[in-house]
């Protein structure tokens, strides 16, 4: 549910961000990386859900808890450890994933924009030279 709202907000904001960035290539690549990261969050949350299910099954499927732990008071430290692991898996890991891919998008976008900027400069200087050559050849003596 949270992921759907994040994706919706990103899709709504993409045209506004691109408009304010004047269709900068760096912004386009960064937004592409962010959108990929949001779509890939499903994997991380499913992995966390599977790990949560597996840890609970491993801890509570044995018969030791049913015989000696009538009120659930003997395994509070186990519950605390599982809650910490699940908090990290559901919150910290997806936040790290989004941050890492956003950082990668910014870096790749800056690199591609730099390459495109130097390529445009080379093309512009070549065009100027061709223009000067044409003007010099077409001068009437």
Image (cartoon, grey):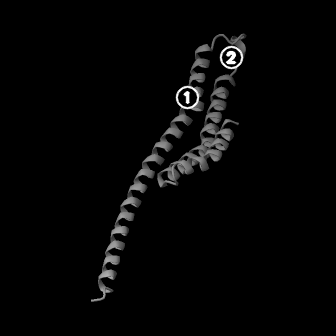
Disc 2 from disc 1: Cα separation = 26 Å
Q: Position of residue 53 (x, y in %)?
A: 67, 31
The residue tagged 2 is 65
In the rendered image, the quadrant that contains the N terminus is top right
Q: How many marks?
A: 2
Drawn side of residue 125 relative to residue 6, left or right: left
Give the mark nearer the N terminus: 2 vs 1: 2
| Quadrant of the drawing holding the C terminus | bottom left
The residue pinned by badge 1 equals 88
SS class of the residue under badge 2?
helix
Going by the picture, which residue comes out furthest to the left?
Answer: 141
Along the line of sight, the residue nearer the viewer: 32 or 14: 14
The residue lying toward the viewer, choosing from 1 and 81, is 1
Position of residue 111 in the picture relative to residue 12 (left or right): left
Q: Residue at x 64, y 35 (%)?
A: 50
Q: Is residue 128 above or below residue 107?
A: below
Q: Identify whether 32 is placed above or below 86.
A: below
């Amino acid at each position: 549910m949270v992921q759907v709202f994040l994706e919706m907000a990103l899709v709504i904001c993409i045209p506004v961000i691109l408009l304010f960035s004047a269709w900068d290539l760096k912004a386009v690549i960064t937004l592409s990386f962010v959108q990929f990261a949001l779509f890939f969050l499903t994997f991380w949350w499913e992995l966390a859900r599977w790990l949560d299910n597996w840890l609970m099954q491993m801890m509570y499927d044995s018969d030791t808890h049913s015989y000696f732990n009538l009120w659930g008071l003997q395994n509070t430290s186990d519950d605390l450890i599982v809650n910490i692991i699940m908090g990290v898996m559901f919150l910290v890991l997806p936040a790290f994933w989004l941050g890492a891919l956003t950082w990668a998008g910014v870096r790749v976008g800056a690199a591609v924009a730099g390459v495109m900027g130097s390529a445009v400069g080379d093309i512009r200087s070549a065009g100027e030279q061709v223009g000067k050559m044409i003007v010099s050849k077409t001068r009437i003596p």
